[in-house]
Image: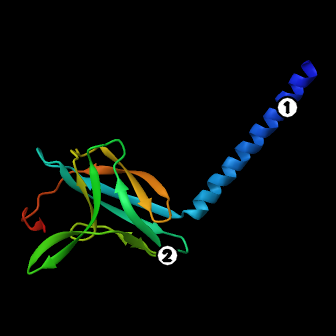
Amino acid sequence: MNRIAALLLGTLLLAAVASSEERQQGGQEEEQKAPLQVEGYARETPPGVEMSAAYLTLHNRGTAARRLLAVELPGRAQASADLHTTVEENGVSRMRPLELLEVPAGGSLRMAPGGVHLMLHGVRLRAGEQLPLRLRFADGQAIEISVPVRKLRATADPHRHHHG
């Protein structure tokens, strides 16, 4: 009985070591498959407001374009994020929703105030916090990141951007 137990234990140990090596190699392969770097920040919300914006820069070091379809806010069931851009119409800046954002192969996509951004709904954010985001891509991949929340800067015309 002891010989069988020792043989079984040895087999289990070998299997565990092999599995660990496969996971480490799999992690390296995943990094090579998904050479995408993401950085950015979110703006704090003024008192009494539950809407904000986030700005990301996505660096695609891969050989194929990446399509960002959606952004989620994990752990915030009542909150949502929309892909948006700002367009000028008759001298007025208006935000428009986007269905997707393409990050070119070997290139970058930079979100910025007055341009492409994430519109965050149902959130109250304070400077110094971290905001977790889940980015969903057309190939089925999801990337989880966390961005810092920065202090809201005063703007010259708080009514310049309009939904419409």
Q: Is residue 97 left or right of residue 90?
A: right
Q: Secondary structure at mark 2?
A: loop
Q: Residue 70 placed where, x, y %?
A: 36, 60
Give the image's coloring scheme: rainbow
Residue in the foreground of this view, choosing between 3 and 148: 3
Residue occupying the point 49% across, 63% down? 36
**Tag 1 and tag 2, C-beta contact below 8 Å:** no
Q: Amino acid at mark 2?
A: Ala
Is 159 on the left or on the right of 71, as rendered?
Answer: left
In the rendered image, which residue does mark 2 sit on? Answer: 105
Q: Amino acid at mark 1?
A: Gly
The residue positioned 17% from the left and 48% from the top of the image is 50
- Can you give x and y, in whole percent of width and height, for residue 18 in the image? 77, 44
For disc 2, the neighbor class at 10 Å (few under 14, some 14 to 19, many from 20) is some
Q: Position of residue 86 (x, y in %)?
A: 20, 71
- Callout 1: SS: helix
* Residue positioned 26% across, 48% down in the render: 79
